[in-house]
Each structure stands twice: as C-alpha cells, then as structure tokens.
Image: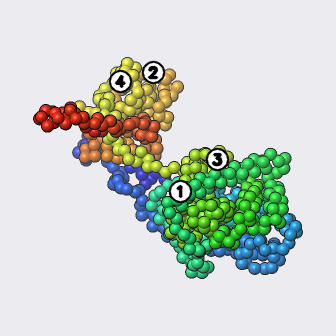
Amino acid sequence: MLSGLQTLFRVTPDSSESPEATGESDSDLLLGGKSGAGSIRALFAPKALGDFTVDWRVLILSGLAIIIGVIGAGIAALLMAMIGLITNIAYYHRFSTALVSPTHMTLGWWSVPIPIIGGLIIGLMARYGSERIRGHGIPEAMETILVGGSKVEPRLAILKPISSAISIGTGGPFGAEGPIILTGGAFGSVIGQFFHLTAAERKTLLVAGAAAGMAATFNTPIAAVLLAVELLLFEWKPRSLVPVALASATATVIRRQFISAALLFPETHYPHLGVDGLLAAAVAGVLGGALAWLLTLGVYGAEDAFRKLPIHWMWWPALGGVVVGVVGVFFPRALGVGYDTIRAELAGSLPLQLLIGFLIAKGVIWCIALGSGTSGGILAPVLLIGGALGSLEGAIFPGHSLGLWALIGMSAALAGVMRSPLTGAIFALELTGAFGSLLPLLIACVIAHVFSTLILKRSILTEKVARRGFHVSREYAVDPLETLKVAEVMRDQVATVAPDLALGSLRTRLDEDPALWEQRLYPVVASSGRLVGVLSRTDVLAAKGGKPDETLNEARKAPGAMTDEAESQPDHAGRLVAQVMRRDMVVAYPDETLRTVAARMVSTNAWRLPVVARDDYHRLLGLISQRELLRARGRLLDEERRRERVLRLTRVRPISGQTKRSEQSGRQPEQSTERAEA
C-alpha cells in the first residue's frame, strides 16, 4: 500500500570509481571497500508534490465502480420487491411485489405472531448462516472497512438482503436502506476481491456499492455520496470520491430509467421562514439532537437488557417480535418501512393526537426490535420519528406548516443520530425537492449535530463498533506530516565519523559522549566532505570477533540490539569504519514531505535517515528520525492546546477643553489615541 509513496535510494559506485578502476570487488563495495567512495542513485524518481495523491489507477476503479453502480441499482430493486412480496403474503395473503404498508391490514390480534415468526427465522439465519446479518448494516460496513481489510464474505451478500426482507416484510419497524447499503457494499467488496487491489482500493469499491444502493433506493445521488464521505470512506480523496460518485450517479440513472424518476416525497409548497423561523429552526435542531440522544440510549439500553437474559441471542429477535406484534395491533402505522406515513407527515395531514401516539409507539418498538439484534435499517425510522416530532413543533413554531417542520424535524433527527449534518440537510432536499428550505434545514442539522456530539461520545452507529473493541474517529484533518517538509524539522547539528576511524576509538567516544550515543546513526564523511556511507550504533557494537560478514548480517537482522554471541567474542577494535559502514543507504531530501519520509521508514525498516542535497547526493545536510516526525505532531498539538490573546483594545481617553486650548496655542497635546496592541 506504501509502494506508491516510497522512494528508495541506494549507494552505487560512480563510473569513475568502478570495481575495475579501484581494484575492489563487489563484496568490498558492499562492506565498505578500500576507497570509501560511492554515489547515491535513485531507484525510483520521487513524485512531484501536488494538492492530491491521486494516480491513474483511479480510472480503473472508476470503471469498476460504474459496473458496481449498475449492480447496486439491481440489488435495491430486488430487495424492495422482496419486502413487498413478503408484506403482501404475511398481512394481505396475496402474491404481489408492490411495496405496501401493514397499515390497512385487518388481521387484528392474529397479526401478532407474524413479527415473532420473522424474528425466529432471522435468529436461525444469524446463528447458522452469518452472525453479521444482525443489526442495521452500517456499523458492520464500518467495521469491515476499519479492521477487515474491506473483505466481505460472499455469503453475506446473499443472507443480508434475505434476512432484511423477512424482518421488514413481517412488520419490523425498519427501513431498507441500511441492509441495501451493506448488501451493495458486500457486492462491491466481493467484486474487488477478484482483482489485484489494495485494501484502500477495495474500500473504495465497497463504499461505491453502498452509495449505489442508497442512491437507487431513495433517488438521492448527492446525499448518497455525502453519506459515504461522512460515514464510510474515512477520507476525502479523489481516489475514492470519484469512483463513489460515479457509482451513485450510475445507480440513479438506472433507477430513473427503469423504475421511477419521481421524487420519493414531493414538496407541497412550503412557506419561506423569516428570522423568527430560522431561530425556531435552531430550537428544532436542539430538540432533534435530544431525540437522537434518547433513541441511542433506547437502542443500546434494549440491547443491554437482552444481554441479561439467560437465553441464546438467537431467540432475541423473536422476543422483540412480541413487542412489535402487540404494539402493531394498536398502531399499525408503526409497522414496516413507513414510507406512506412519512409522506403523510410531509403533507401535514396527520392529526396531532395520532402524531403523539405514533412518536412514542414507533420509537419504542424500533429501539426494542433493533436492540434485539434483528436485521433492518435506521434511516427511514429516524425520518419517520423525527417527522412526527417536527409536525408537533409545527403547531407552535412560525409558519404553522406541519409539513415544513416535519421536514426540518426529519433532517435534524437524522443529523443527530448519524452525526452527518450535510447528509441530513441534502438528503431532505433530494427527497422532497424543497430547495427553498435549505437554510432552516442547514441550521437545524448543524445544531442537532453539535448537540449530539456534546452529550454523546458515540453515535448509534459507532457505539456498536466500539462495543466490539474498536475505536472509530470520524474527524477529518490534514496530516501535519503532509504539510511539513524535512528541512523544517531535521536535525542539522550532526556528528559524523571518518572512514579511516578505528572502531575501538569510536566505541570509546560513544561511551564518553551521551549525545553521540543518542544519535544512533553516524554519517561517514570523507576528508573531502563527501558522504560515503552510514554507520549505526548497532554496527559498531556488533563488530566483534568471528567472521565479519556473519556478524554484520546478524546485527542487521536485529537493529538496535547486540547479540549475546557478539558480547562474548573478543574485541576487534582495530577494524576501520570503512570496513563496516553501509554504502547501501536510504536517504531523505530536504524538500520532501514528512509523510513521504515516514512511509519510506516503514517500508525499509530504517528509522533514521541522512538528509542529503537534491542536487548533490554526497552533501550531507542533516539527519531525520522518528523523534523529528513526532515533533511535527507536537506542532499540531500546540496549535490546538495553546491559547493566546493576540490583540487588545485600550480605553480611549476623552479630549478635555484644556487639551483643545493647548492645540490652538500650538503646543503638543498629550497623546491620547486608540491603540491596538499585539
């Protein structure tokens, strides 16, 4: 993965100092030879610095991403058809793939066993198929990216959509987008595993499949890309953004050509809000963040309660199905995906009493069902619950538009739950086309986001990953190693040694000089001032007795350590530095970024590098080690932690009448000006 970053540099003989010209053999040159001369040759030309690190492989990934986009659209259509089929069979006893809601079912109490049976089937599939089908999909995708090398087992691409279709089709209060995201990502990962790709490239294809699935489900290509960036990619680079965007666009085109080009929830002409409305949007953001907090606590509180039960987790989804079935008898709108209810909320056609009951019922059964470990998504339920809260806010907030405030409540709840404010705002716009409401949506989403991040350490997505022992950081920042160059941090006061220095004398100096001992790597500089090699402290300590070649090789196998065998052998202090020094050097240049040097250190296992001039490879400029790299990190910490007051204002002294008379008489008045001191 570092091959594109690393640049190796070796010392090879000059043409004027070839083995034939100097009378040295190849082994003499490798071990130091007689002349102590050599030159540094670049095996690979260093890359020119630029704004991005993208290369031509992005075109290959983009081509694969377009194919994945087509597949993702097909997966989304197939999953929605499966959900519709199971819902029609379970609640209406008819064979149809049309997506319907259990709202109008007439089974009464006979509907209670339906989600129980569905939960039982999912529990069996999870235990004997793949445990990774449990949950809503996005945390599983994040974990695969972070710790699994973006390698998804192929059977998950089959089991996850089937289990999700069963869960939602039997009344589970979930959305299809989470399973589609994981399923699309699984197919993207599986396709990537057939090619010779790095883990970062497989991640790009996995996320491309996830974005394609979401775009095809909701007809929201931009929100799908933002979701990928804010949640799954863990980077903002052209190498990943371009393929993901192409996959999302491709899936959207397929959907609009073969399924429907219409908006999922078209706008019903919302009013424009004034300043008072924007202030109310900020309040809605706070309430959305509080709702996100309650939902997160509810989901993981339910999960903790299930963990305390003295039964296998395979039975948990069936127990969660009991609650879903009973509540569904009284609030059938709370069952299933709930797209019809979301549409009614955005139209402002639901009575307030129903909204209150629905807010409580949907929230309770969703938390319990998701905490039981069944299979289902979170986007549609969060939209629905947030819309109910927003509709209630619309009864008292400016504009008195239940539909508009339902939209604002949806986006705020989504931004708070997922910690993705841009996704929340743009998602709401693409779902409805209400672009005139962009400003209140943005305000509500960012307020909900900051409220959620302040009161909760983890989101509903990352908490699940954290409970499995993995830390997730979702903050993007430019690596300080990418912005600083070697010349800014390198050590320019470097102790050097001569090639004709005896090792015994050098060991004596090491014992007497702590600074020399700490340096660890000693550039070998000839009398002419040319760098001809390097010598490590390990090389000095290991040059004792036995065959020099074997001793040196053994020391190089364990840098920084002296073997017991070397300690017990007699001291050959008469050997010269030129006989032990390394001509095959790895070097750094002063105009390189620290990230390039850090990658070179990792790939070559050389943790201290001499810094040489770009135009003269034999001119030593300094030394760079891990310590200097950490100092670059220290600069970032200093910028974040050190607080200072740069400007100060002093009080203005009024001009008195006496001062005015002094000015008129030509005398210099006392200085009285407004100053800004830095």
Q: Secondary structure at mark 4?
A: helix
State the residue position of label 3: 466
Sooner in the amino-acid sequence: mark 1 or mark 3: 1
Q: CA distance from mark 1 to mark 3?
A: 35 Å
* Image location (x, y in percent) of residue 130: 73, 58
257 is higher (above) or lower (below) than 608: below
Q: Which residue is mark 4?
A: 506
- Residue 16 seen: yes
Crowd class of label 3 (few under 14; some 14 to 19; many from 20; radius 10 Å) = some
Dot 4 and dot 2 residues touching (CB under 8 Å) = no
Mark closest to the chain's N terminus, 3 or 2: 3
Give the labeled residue for mark 1.
279
In percent of width and height, residue 348 lies at 65, 70
Q: Are marks 3 and 2 in contact (CB under 8 Å)?
A: no
Does dot 1 land on a helix, a strand or a loop? helix
Res 570 label: 2
Label 4 vs 3, first from the N-terminus: 3
Q: Earlier in the sequence, mark 1 or mark 2?
A: 1
Residue 178 to residue 537: above or below:
below
From this view, report whether residue 598 is shown above or below residue 206: above
